[in-house]
Amino acid sequence: MEKESVSEEEIRGMENYLSGYRLNQKLLRMDRYERAYLGGGDNEDDFPGELPLARARMFEVRQFIMGMKNSDEKLMLYYHYVKGESVEKCAELLGISRSSGFRLKKRALRLAVVHNNKESK
């Protein structure tokens, strides 16, 4: 694994970016629920383009993670942020302890920042 200096602020920013997947996923679920059970959601004048933008952001996050080098860190990010599994469940899936799971998540976020910085250049 590459050793590059990554600030805590960059890590928090990456975590926020990746967490956007679940937020947009909830937004789409809520919209489907509203349409199905409350008869609403037909008026897209409130926030035009909101749902296509949510889908595009989800696609962007998924593509970002899948573009990373194959590793346990990539799997952690995918299962935690895209699949919505807890860090504990991800650790179990990867066959590591709970505490190792949290350390792996932190390494994965650092690796994601480095990957993002390389893509930006």
Image: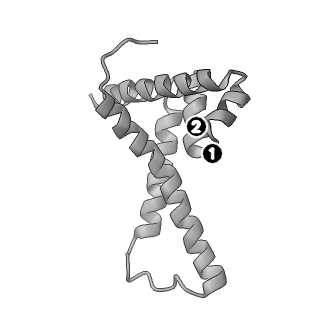
Provide residue 115's location: percent of width, then percent of height: 39, 26
Name which residue type carries label 1: Lys
> Which residue is more in the foreground, 93 or 75?
93
Give the residue furthest to the front. Answer: 99
Q: Quadrant of residue 76?
A: top right
> Which residue is more in the foreground, 89 or 66?
89
User: Mark 1 = which residue?
Assistant: 83
Residue in the image at 47% along x and 47% along y: 19
Of the 4 image quadrants, the one containing the C terminus is top left
The number of discs equals 2
Q: How far apart in space, not on screen, are marks 1 and 2 (Cα)?
A: 7 Å
Q: Quadrant of residue 118?
A: top left
Q: Secondary structure at mark 2?
A: helix
Q: Secondary structure at mark 1?
A: loop
87 relative to 95, above or below = below
Residue 39 visible here: yes
Residue 70 visible here: no
Provide residue 87's location: percent of width, then percent of height: 61, 35
> Which residue is more in the foreground, 78 or 89?
89
Give the residue furthest to the left. Answer: 121
User: Mark 2 = which residue?
Assistant: 78
Give neighbour class at mark 1: few <14, some 14-19, many 20+ (Cα, 10 Å). Answer: few
